[in-house]
């Protein structure tokens, strides 16, 4: 039997739809919503960050995303920093990175951030 690899390419919209379908809700923010529960935020992070197999930076980036409300409301760097107990400068660096890759957007007038619609 001759084995040949099959490759399927998906558009960004198709990938987004698969993520939404898999989560049963809308986009990445819905997948991360459980991480953003304030009561368990620090204990979840503490438990996960102790694993030598996991990236603490990636966990923090995901927690930054999880802080944003699903309704599209905006938050300031100081809001996120306070909630996660991070320094404002570190929080700003994470949010600037997320902005650069399109996982956050910033309102020019207020300089506040939000998760783009459909994420």
Image (cartoon, rainbow, N blue to C red):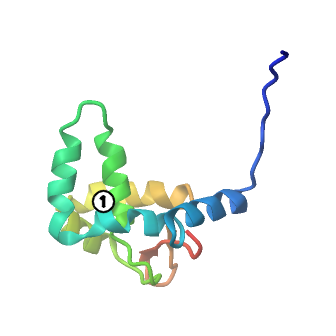
Assign a secondary structure to mark 1. helix
The residue positioned farthest toward the front in the image shown? 1
* Image coords of residue 30 (percent x, y): 45, 69
Q: Quadrant of residue 42?
A: bottom left
Which residue does the image show at 28% across and 54% down from the upper left?
A: 90
Vertically, is 52 above or below 100? above
Looking at the rendered image, the quarter that the N terminus falls into is: top right
Number of dots carrying numbers: 1
Is 17 on the left-hand or right-hand side of 40? right
Residue annotated with mark 1: 91
Residue situated furthest top in the rendering? 1
Would you call the spot at circle 1 few (<14 residues within 10 Å), some (14-19), or many (20 or more)?
A: many
Residue at 37%, 54% (x, y): give it.
61
Q: Quadrant where the C terminus lies?
A: bottom right
Q: Is residue 93 something one can see in this rendering? A: no
Q: Looking at the image, which residue is at 31% across and 37% down?
A: 54
- Rendering coords of residue 46 (x, y %): 16, 49
Q: Is residue 86 visible?
A: yes
Of residues 22 and 2, the one drawn nearer to the viewer in this rendering: 2
Q: Position of residue 6 (x, y in %)?
A: 79, 32
Q: Position of residue 5 (x, y in %)?
A: 78, 26
């Amino acid at each position: 039997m001759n084995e040949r690899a099959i490759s399927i390419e998906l558009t960004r919209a198709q990938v987004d739809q698969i993520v939404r379908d898999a989560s049963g809700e809308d986009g990445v923010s819905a997948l991360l919503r459980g991480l953003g529960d304030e009561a368990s935020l620090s204990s979840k992070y503490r438990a996960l960050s102790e694993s030598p197999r996991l990236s603490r930076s990636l966990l923090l980036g995901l927690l930054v995303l999880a802080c944003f409300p699903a309704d599209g409301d905006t938050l300031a760097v100081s809001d996120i920093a306070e909630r996660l107990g991070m320094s404002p400068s570190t929080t700003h660096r994470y949010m600037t990175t997320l902005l650069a890759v399109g996982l956050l957007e910033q309102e020019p007038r207020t300089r506040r951030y939000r998760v783009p619609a459909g994420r």
